[in-house]
Amino acid sequence: AKRLGIKKLGAFLRHSDEMVVCYTDVYLQRLWTIYEVAIFLALHPLERLTVLPVSKSLLFFGIAAIIYLGQVTQAIIGVWIHFPGLFFITQVPSFFMLMYVFRDWAREKMQIQQRLSQFIVNTSICFCAED
């Protein structure tokens, strides 16, 4: 079944408009995932490939929750107290966190490019032909 699936992968990807990669550190160590991306990029332009870091998703949701709580706090307190600096107190910390996340993601993207340039089939986890 695996072998048949691998043989049909090219046909499946040919009919796909876009590809989303849920990226982890293991992704570039597995031979079949590299094969999948290589086939997709042979058939489609790079702009149709989206890489999403799984490690950052929880952090993004956390920051979204902090921004939301800041808005709620601002709305509740703003009803009783008129304080022009309230926005900065409730929202600025979340902007700094967002800057950290984006900077960290930029560094991770550079590491991904470096790992791709150093990819060796013999060091892949799925080196065995039966896999």
Image (cartoon, rainbow, N blue to C red):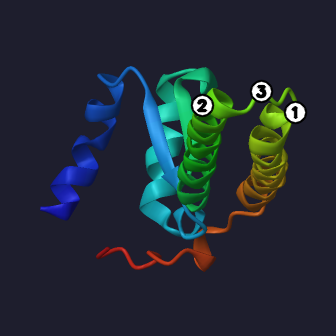
Quarter containing the C terminus: bottom left
Q: CA distance from mark 2 to mark 3?
A: 11 Å
Q: Nearer the viewer, mark 1 or mark 3?
A: 3
**Residue 82 falls in which quadrant of the image?**
top right
* Residue 8, numbered circle: none
Q: Give the residue number, with chain letter if any, for mark 3.
A: 82
> Are discs 1 and 3 less than 8 Å apart at CB?
no
Tag of residue 85: 1
Residue type pointed to by label 1: Gly
The residue sitting at the front extreme is 80
- Say which quadrant the N terminus sits in: bottom left
Alpha carbons under labels 1 and 3: distance apart: 9 Å
Q: Front-most of 63 and 123?
A: 63
Mark 3: give few (<14), some (14-19) or many (20+) Cα within 10 Å. few
Instruction: Judge whether 72 appears above or below 27 on screen.
Output: above
Element carrying mark 2: helix
Q: Are marks 1 and 2 in contact (CB under 8 Å)?
A: no
First in residue order: circle 2 vs circle 3: 2
Pick the residue in front: 122 or 74.
74
| Comes first in the chain, label 1 or label 2 | 2
Q: Which residue is mark 2?
A: 75
